[in-house]
Amino acid sequence: MRNNIIYISISLATCVIVGVVYSFYRYYAPPQPKQSYMINTTPDDTIRIAFIGDSWAFMHKEHECKIATILQDSIHTPVKVHSYGVCGLTSKEIYENIFRDDNFRLFMSKRQYRYCYVSAGINDTYKKMSTSYYQQSMDGIIRFLLANHIHPILQEIPDYDIQISFEMQKLSKKILRHLSIIINSTPLDCKQIFRDALDELIQEKGYSDKLSILRYKSWNDNGKKDLNTLYRNDRLHLNDRGYTALDSAIAKEILTCISSGHNNEFQLE
């Protein structure tokens, strides 16, 4: 009887350990590539811009008219902006939502978007994921947009206060972040590492002339001054002034694309 109890205890402990290891593996593993599906839409004369990604895209819903107004005043063409984001998502979760979120499919298929601003990777740095996790996720997002002839505008990791964001977390989250730092060899302040990883991906895949990267220094380069004026008290999310600055930079990038006669056509291998 005693031997049976010991055997059962060992078996249960082994199952728990295997389950924990498998959960961590799935949590930290980069996404598996998926075949891009095509969006069936009818083009019109309106320039339509999608905002997708994490909380930055979600919170942009209240500011959609800003970038539309900026562009319409410059090009005298109807502009519509639509935002769809889910708070807290990592780049991998954003990529996977493209295929498993029916609301996202509906959001993309209802309109003929020409440009898509992508806010992805902030939570990767916040949660200390690996750069390979980030690169493979971003590659999948890029490929999906290009396959549907949509010009991606990728948000470079902004200069949010990553130290304060870490300190404001609960103890259990801090422990998980420390574990992530060890597993992924990702330091606490990893913003520049992820910016470099995005540049490396773009160069290796030959995407340079097929998309835009919105450099954080184009709108978020004043250190503590920006943190006080552009961000909310959490130093992680933008306030009204922040979205005005961000939208102005995005509008400038789109105007550059329009003036250069950028072609969204791209054939995937």
Image: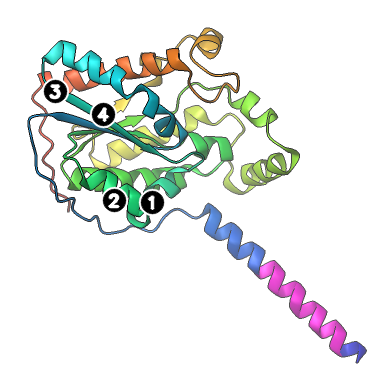
Mark toward the start of the polypeptide (2 vs 4)? 4
Mark toward the start of the polypeptide (4 vs 1)? 4
| C-alpha separation, residue under disc 2 versus residue under disc 1 | 9 Å
In the picture of the structure, the residue carrying the numbered disc 4 is 81
Look at label 1 and name its amino acid.
Answer: Asn
* 120 left or right, relative to 226: left
Q: Residue at x 28, y 44 (%)?
A: 107
Mark toward the start of the polypeptide (2 vs 1)? 1
Q: Residue at x 45, y 24 (%)?
A: 158
Q: Position of residue 24 (x, y in %)?
A: 60, 57
The dot on residue 105 is: 2
> Could you say whether the residue bearing mark 1 is in a helix, strand or loop?
helix
Look at label 3 and name its amino acid.
Answer: Pro
Residues 129 and 109: in front is 109
Residue extent of the magenta highlight: 4-18
Q: Residue at x 22, y 56 (%)?
A: 37
| C-alpha separation, residue under disc 3 versus residue under disc 1 | 29 Å
* 95 left or right, relative to 88: left
Mark toward the start of the polypeptide (3 vs 1)? 3
> Could you say whether the residue bearing mark 2 is in a helix, strand or loop?
helix
Check the picture and name the quadrant holding the N terminus.
Answer: bottom right
In the picture of the structure, the residue carrying the numbered disc 3 is 78
Q: Is residue 99 visible?
A: yes
| C-alpha separation, residue under disc 3 versus residue under disc 2 | 24 Å
Q: Position of residue 44 (x, y in %)?
A: 8, 35
Look at label 4 and name its amino acid.
Answer: Val
